Each structure stands twice: as structure tokens, then as C-alpha cells.
Image (cartoon, rainbow, N blue to C red):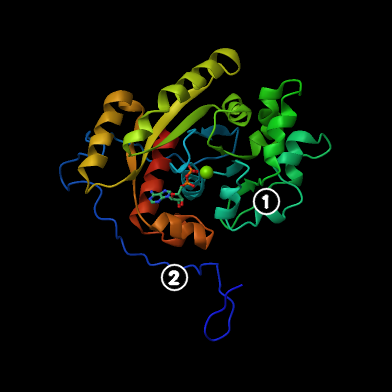
Amino acid sequence: MSTLPHGGAVELSIAPRAASDADDDGPEEVSGTGIGPTGRPRRHIPEPALLDHHGPARVLAMCNQKGGVGKTTSTINLGAALTEFGRRVLLVDFDPQGALSVGLGIPAHQLDRTIYNVLIERSVGIEDVVLRTGVENMDLLPSNIDLSAAEVQLVSEVGREHSLLRTIRPVLDSYDYILVDCQPSLGLLTVNALAAADGVLIPLECEFFSLRGVALLIDTIEKVRERLNPKLEITGILATMFDPRTLHSREVMARVVEAFKDTVFDTVINRTVRFPETTVAGEPITTWAPRSAGAKAYRQLAREVIAR
Ligand SMILES: Nc1ncnc2c1ncn2[C@@H]1O[C@H](COP(=O)(O)OP(=O)(O)O)[C@@H](O)[C@H]1O
Ligand SMILES: [Mg+2]
């Protein structure tokens, strides 16, 4: 191990930088025009109604087989924003990488029991594994690398595509939203997420190559709807990592809106270093930098999701 001049060991962990609440990402629209970053007039979104009871949950799969497009970031921050509107939320980490769990400050690799055990062992129930998070009314079904074995083990299981649905069914009435953070593949785990979901939310990076895999994803969604889950819908496409200063970002956005029309949410998530910083802090941007543009954007997304 290399040492620093004063003899201390090199620290590889990064200390969370203090949150600042400055609205550093600039205004989201040219003021007064009513035109949003998608290039369309913003649609009216009604104020979310207050709930007088909770459940049954709407299950949303956060899905895109491309990695690094903002699935996990959107799961954490949409979930946290939904709780601000009085919704009870369960986040399901359905990626063996465990990034969702880690992003909420939970040392997933140290856990003895995760979603893997609920999927595979009939004696383990979801209530045995669900954890509270630092956000009130937001719980987590954690995962770690153990889940990668489930994909193989489930292949020989009866009703293998409905394993996740069986897992979450006992708690559907306890939550208003269950967000499933999918792994970057269209394999059996993702098919399980789609089979359990009411809707799919597709985060799409505003980059040239991002459109390539979407046709295949939509094809998979349609097959799951025909064969396994007739109620499945595409809730919306969320443009992420948008940089309003670059022509490239704006051109990709124009193509996305042209291709997917009203399916594209009015809310757009800008590229900002704030999001990698929240991962280090282990909490959502809505609590870490509550007045930042990123926090406001995910609140706006929550309103759109509630309205759809
Ligand atoms: N809007 C954004 N701007 C800048 N970086 C982002 C943004 N959203 C996510 N990131 C960062 O990009 C990386 C990949 O995001 P992540 O949500 O983990 O994607 P996925 O789950 O699709 O693989 C992470 O380091 C995350 O902090
Ligand atoms: Mg992820």
C-alpha cells in the first residue's frame, strides 16, 4: 500500500462535500415563453391530490438495457420526490450491482439477506428483508451480487417470469408506488420486472447512441404485454443528462420528441455533477440539496407520474 508523505495510508473513499443549495443549473425554460426543454409548450399538470388511504401500489419498472443512463439515479430521486407528495414508496433494487442500495447509504455487500433470498427461498418473506431508508415513507428491498445467481436458478422454476410479482404481492397494499430499478440487460430479471409492472419508465440519455437500443426495448415490452402482462404500459420516456448549452443535446432531444411524442415527459433532467455527489452522500438530491435544479426536476417528474 502506498503511503502519503506524512505516513498516513492513502484514503480511497471520498468524503461527501457539504451540500449547497444554490440553484446552479440555470433556469429550465426561457422565462415567459412557456416552452420547456423538450421544445414543446409545457402541459398543465394538476396539483397531486392528497391521499386518504394508501395502496394498492402502482408498480413502475425503471428500464433501459443501456447502462449509465440514469435508471438508478431516477429511481432514488423519483421515489424520494413521491414521498414529498404524501406517497408511500418501496424501491426494489433489481440489479446485482446493488447501486440503488449503495446510493441510499446501505452497505449492500454486507447484508445476509436480500431480494435474492425472497426470490429463491420459500421460507423468507419480503417483510424479513425490507429496510427503512433515511427518507421517511420510503423503504428499500436491497440487493447485492447474490442476485446474479437468481437469474440462473430461476430458469428451472415454475412460473419463472412471475417470481418478482410473487415476491412483492404481499406488500402491494402497503405502498402507493413500487419502483423497480432494473439491471442493464433484457434478461430474465428484467422480464420479471416487466411482468410485475403496471408501467415502464424509460430513462434515455441525451446522447447520439442512446436511441439505438430503444426499439429492442419497446419490442420486449410489447412481447411481455402480449404473453405475460396485458396491463403493461409505457408510462413515459425521461430524457436525462441533458445539456441545454450544447447543440448536440438539443438535437437528440428533438429526435426523441419526434419519435416518441407525448410519451416523453415534459420534465427533463439536466447533466450536473450534483448527481454523482449525492451517490457519495448516500441520499437523494431532494434531501441533500433540496432547492437545487435537480431536486426541483425530480419533484416535477413526480407530479407528472402521479398525473399519468
Ligand atoms: N443527470 C445527471 N447528470 C450527471 N450525472 C448523472 C446524472 N444522472 C446520473 N448521473 C451519474 O451517471 C452515472 C450513471 O447513473 P445511474 O443512475 O447509475 O445509471 P444506470 O442505473 O442507468 O446505470 C452515475 O455515476 C450517476 O451519478
Ligand atoms: Mg443502475
Of the pair 264 and 174, the residue shown nearer to us: 264
Q: Secondary structure at mark 2?
A: loop
Instruction: Please tell me which of labels 2 and 1 falls first in the chain.
Output: 2
Q: Residue at x 22, y 35 (%)?
A: 39
**Would residue 36 be visible to someone looking at this image?**
no
Q: Amino acid at mark 2?
A: Ala
Query: In the rendered image, which quarter contains the C terminus?
Result: top left
Residue 68 placement (x, y as % from top left): 45, 43
Find residue 131 and name its label: 1
Looking at the picture, how far across and down is residue 207, in whole percent?
Answer: 33, 39
In screen coordinates, is 253 left or right of 134? Answer: left
The residue that appears at 63% across and 27% down in the rendered structure is 188
The crowd level at tag 1 (other Cα within 10 Å; few <14, some 14-19, many 20+) is: some
- What residue is pinned by disc 2? 18
Figure quadrant of the N terminus: bottom right
Q: Is residue 269 above or below residue 26?
A: above
State the SS at label 1.
strand
Mark-to-mark CA distance, 2 and 1: 26 Å
Q: Residue furthest top?
A: 226
Other residues around mark 2 within 10 Å, as few (<14) / some (14–19) / many (≥20) = few
